[in-house]
Amino acid sequence: MNIFNVRVYGILINDNHEVLVSDEWIHDTRITKFCGGGLEWGEGTIDCLKREFKEEMKLPIEIIKHIYTTDFYVQSMFTPSHQIISIYYQVKPLAPIQVPIKKIPFDYDEEQLSTYATTGETAAFRFIPWANFSDLTVDLPIDKVVARMLKQ
C-alpha cells in the first residue's frame, strides 16, 4: 500500500541573515534539514508547523508566507513505500529562542545523546550564515530545491 507522507517546514532567517536548520540523527542517519515535521491526522499545515516549532524548540512562530510545495516525486528515505510531499513556509519567531543554538553540525549535548539512546532520534539547532548557506548545506532532496530557490 502506498502512502503519502506530508511534511511541513519553516524557513526562519534571523536579523543577522542566518538560516535556521536542524541537525538530526535518526536511526543511524544524520541529516541537516529545515525545521518542521510530519502532518498529523486532523491537522492543517499551518497548525502542524506551529506545533512542530513549539514541540522541538519551545518557540511560538508566525507564518509569513507560503514558499514552496513539492512538485516532483520523492520516495521516503526511511519508509520506501511512502511518497513525501513537503510544504514550506517563511516563518518568524514570536519570542526569543530558548533552546541551545549550536555552532558546529551534529553537536549534541548529554540530554540530546540520552534522547537518542532512548528513542533512536535527536536534534540540535544552528544558524548558517546566509553567505555560507546553499543547497549543499541541507541534505533532503526537497530542501535542496528550496535552498536553491531562496538563494536566487
Image (cartoon, rainbow, N blue to C red):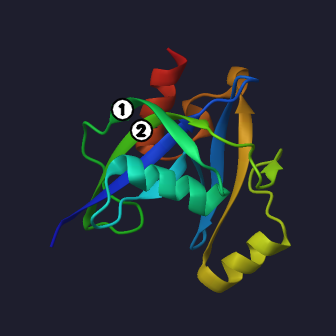
**Is residue 74 something that shows in the picture?**
yes
Residue nearest the observer in this picture, 47 or 136: 47
**Is residue 30 something that shows in the picture?**
no
Q: Is residue 79 left or right of residue 62?
A: left
Q: Is residue 41 left or right of residue 1?
A: right
The residue that label 2 is drawn on is 88
In the rendered image, residue 147, in percent from the top left (x then y), is placed at 51, 30
The residue that label 1 is drawn on is 68
In the rendered image, residue 79, in percent from the top left (x then y), is placed at 35, 69
Q: Amino acid at mark 1?
A: Tyr
In the rendered image, residue 51, in percent from the top left (x then y), is placed at 49, 58
Q: Quadrant of the N terminus?
A: bottom left
Q: Quadrant of residue 106?
A: bottom right
Report the residue at 25% width, 39% height from top: 72
The image shows residue 61, relative to residue 3, as above or below, that is: above
Report the residue at 77% width, 52% height from top: 98
Q: Secondary structure at mark 2?
A: strand
Q: Is residue 74 left or right of residue 26?
A: left
The 10 Å Cα crowd at callout 1, few under 14, some 14 to 19, many 20 or more, is: some
